[in-house]
Each structure stands twice: as structure tokens, then as C-alpha cells.
């Protein structure tokens, strides 16, 4: 196989990838073999989310999560748990009583405690860190209006961090979000971390998802954000790095608009493969990202890609369903793309 990014960046930060349930089930083991060569840490793309682990009140399903942890242990790779508290991919039953009415604060706290203790407790000592809370802050810095916040109150996040710490005092605990380069969000994340530190709520790191594009965010925004996050006194991680090179419906357009746009050929320009100049632009842009990560490597502990190869990428179905994505370093045949070689060359 190609040279190993894990080894190339050994002195800078860990290299990770998100693994799908399908890849764990694939008996050829092709994607997993590549991950074992390229990565020092892995994340479950979906298998540790609430809807996957705990689909019904009294039923847990650890099948794929166990497979991921066992794969990692067999290969000397670490595991990041993703994610305990999120407004998305969390079943409705969590928030409702038998009549379908919203449960009150105490009951929801009890359910949160039970879920976190069960899940984090099961993998105690085997998961290096958890994305305890995912995407709780809006781009403008306001708190997201989720069922968690509405039904528990503003302290739902610190409760989640405390429950996770009770279940595995040795696990690192993270706050994870997208658009972490937006000024409003940066301010609120910094204030939250300071508040947690003051109140001794255990927090060890912040994750910048890194769903970035050819033109977003700017080099300056990334550079400044990494400088600022680096001053918070917690680990900084790039947790879901990928690069959508397909046209994006603009912000604020709803899913219905995106669906209609999908049928326009303009939304699917690279169905037959990525033209050389776009491929090169992507490679240059990934190189820029990694130059910035190296510059800030005193603060950055990990860079995780959101998937192994283009065929797996969630961008095949988001923000528009049924496209052909080209977001990652390996193509659909698991061959390294120009972006892989440029990232390797920056090391
Ligand atoms: C995505 C997965 O990649 C998809 O397979 C799934 O259908 C939806 O979720 N932010 C996150 C990730 O924190 O969990 C999301 O993963 C991508 C956006």
C-alpha cells in the first residue's frame, strides 16, 4: 500500500478516520486494512450514536460498536467515541413518555445518566475520549434550541460531561462542532470552556469537525481559530475533516430546495470523475490545511478524516441525495488521490 500518514505525522498529531458499519461487516477487510496502515485512531461514523446503540428504551445494540473497538485493539489503534448528546440521530422515545408527551427535567436527566453510564461504562479503559456533546451552539454563538436544552435546561451539557466522567474517569471528554471558525461560535465555545474549567466540569478538548470546502473557511480564519483555541488550555482536534468539491446549495436553503436542485445537472458536475484541475485544486487545498495543522501542532492532538474513501463519504447524500462525492484522500477503489500525496508531502 501507499506510505502511511500515521507514520509521516507521528511527531505532529494522530491521524484518524471514521469507519462505517458496512466497512466493519465487509469480509474482504479492504477498507479496514487501509485504516490499519494509515491511522493511529478511529471513530465510528454512526455506530456509537444514540439511535444505533440504544434504539428502544430497554434495548441496546452494541454489535458494530464492539466490532470497531475490537478491530482497533487488534491493530493497536485508539478509539474516539462519537457521540453521547446530539439533537440528531437520537430517537424520539428519549424525550417522550408513553403518551408521546415531552418528559420533564428529572426524567430526561435520568435517561441521559443511564445511557451515558451504560455506554461509556461498557468501553471503560478502551475508548480514549468521547465527543460528549455535539453541535450545541449555533454559528452566531447562541445556544441551539434542542429538546435536550428545552427539557433539561442550560445545564444539560455539564451534566453530560459529569456523567461521562463518573463512568470512565480515565477517558478524555470533548465538545465537538462544525463551523468552529465562525466568530460567534468561537466566542461561545471559549466562554463555555472557561466556565467549565471554573466550575470543574471535566473537559479535555474541543473538536473542529472540519467539513470544509475549496473556498471555505479562509486560510486566515483557520489560522486565527487554531491560535485562539490553542489558548484555551484544552486539546484541539480536527475531528471530521473532508472537502466537498460539489456545488453547495447556499446556507439557509432548506432540504426541499436541495432535493429539487439535485435533479439539475449543475448539482452533479463530476459524476464521471473529478477533472484534473479540480483534483489538483483539492490537493493544494488539503496541503494548505495540513501546513496550518503543522504550524499549530503544539495545540492539535489529532486530525481525523470523516471517512476512508470517496464512495463512503456522507457527501454522496448530503446536502443533496444521490450525488457522486470526491471529498476524501482515497477514491472509490481505495487508491490514493493527488490529495493524499500532497498531504503526505507536507509532513
Ligand atoms: C453523518 C454520517 O457520516 C452519515 O452516514 C449519517 O447519515 C449522518 O451523520 N456531523 C457529525 C457526524 O457530527 O456525526 C455526521 O455524520 C456528519 C456531520
Image: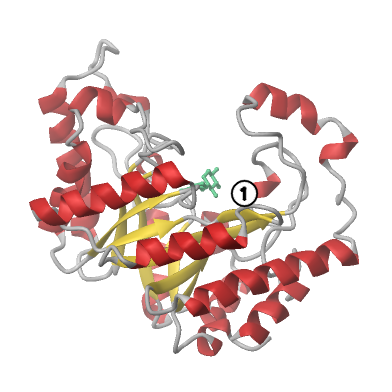
Check the picture and name the quadrant holding the C terminus: bottom right
Q: Can residue 76 be seen at all in this image of the molecule?
A: yes
Name the residue rendered at 76%, 48% in the picture. Answer: 246
Residue 312 at x, y percent in the picture: 64, 56
Q: Position of residue 76 (x, y in %)?
A: 39, 83
> Residue 63: x, y in percent?
39, 55
Residue for badge 1: 314
Q: Nearer the viewer, residue 123 or 60?
A: 123
**Other residues around mark 1 within 10 Å, as few (<14) / some (14–19) / many (≥20):** some
98 left or right, relative to 146: left
Looking at the rendered structure, the secondary structure element under dot 1 is helix
Give me the residue at 64% from left, 89% from top. 3
Quarter occupied by residue 43: bottom left
Residue 140: which quarter of the image? top left
Residue 181 at x, y = what percent?
A: 49, 52
Front position in the image: 201 or 309: 201
Assess mark 1: CB under 8 A from ligand 1?
A: yes
Is residue 66 at all visible to an observer of this figure?
Answer: no
Please say if 40 is above or below 183. Answer: below
- Closer to the camera, 302 or 27? 302
Amino acid at each position: 500500500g501507499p506510505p502511511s500518514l500515521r507514520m509521516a505525522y507521528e511527531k505532529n498529531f494522530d491521524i484518524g478516520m471514521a469507519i462505517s458499519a458496512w466497512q466493519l461487516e465487509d469480509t474482504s477487510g479492504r477498507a479496514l486494512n487501509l485504516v490499519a496502515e494509515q491511522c493511529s485512531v478511529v471513530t465510528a461514523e454512526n455506530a456509537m450514536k444514540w439511535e444505533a446503540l440504544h434504539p428502544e428504551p430497554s434495548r441496546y445494540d452494541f454489535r458494530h460498536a464492539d466490532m470497531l473497538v475490537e478491530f482497533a485493539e487488534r491493530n493497536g489503534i485508539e478509539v474516539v467515541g462519537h457521540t453521547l448528546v446530539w439533537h440528531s440521530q437520537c430517537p424520539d422515545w428519549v424525550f417522550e413518555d408513553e403518551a408521546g408527551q415531552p418528559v420533564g427535567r428529572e426524567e430526561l436527566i435520568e435517561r441521559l445518566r443511564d445511557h451515558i453510564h451504560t455506554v461509556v461504562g461498557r468501553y471503560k479503559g478502551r475508548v480514549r475520549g468521547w465527543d460528549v456533546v455535539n453541535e450545541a451552539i449555533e454559528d452566531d454563538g447562541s445556544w441551539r434550541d434542542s429538546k435536550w436544552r428545552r427539557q433539561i435546561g442550560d445545564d444539560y451539557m455539564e451534566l453530560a460531561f459529569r456523567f461521562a466522567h463518573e463512568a470512565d474517569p480515565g477517558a478524555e471528554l470533548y465538545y465537538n462542532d462544525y463551523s468552529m471558525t465562525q466568530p460567534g461560535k468561537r466566542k461561545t465555545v471559549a466562554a463555555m470552556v472557561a466556565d467549565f474549567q471554573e466550575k470543574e466540569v471535566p473537559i479535555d478538548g474541543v473538536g473542529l469537525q472540519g467539513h470544509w470546502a475549496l473556498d471555505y473557511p479562509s486560510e486566515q480564519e483557520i489560522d486565527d481559530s487554531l491560535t485562539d483555541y490553542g489558548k484555551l488550555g484544552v486539546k484541539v482536534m480536527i475531528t471530521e475533516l473532508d472537502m466537498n468539491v460539489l456545488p453547495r446549495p447556499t446556507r439557509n436553503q432548506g432540504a426541499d430546495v436541495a432535493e429539487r436542485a439535485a435533479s439539475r445537472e449543475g448539482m452533479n458536475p463530476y459524476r464521471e470523475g473529478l477533472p484534473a484541475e479540480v483534483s489538483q485544486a483539492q490537493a493544494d487545498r488539503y496541503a494548505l490545511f495540513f501546513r496550518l495543522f503543522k504550524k499549530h501542532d503544539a495545540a492539535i492532538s489529532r486530525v481525523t478524516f470523516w471517512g476512508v474513501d470517496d464512495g463512503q463519504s456522507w457527501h454522496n447524500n448530503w446536502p443533496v441525495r444521490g450525488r457522486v462525492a470526491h471529498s476524501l484522500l482515497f477514491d472509490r477503489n481505495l487508491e490514493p488521490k493527488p490529495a493524499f500525496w500532497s498531504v503526505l508531502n507536507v509532513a
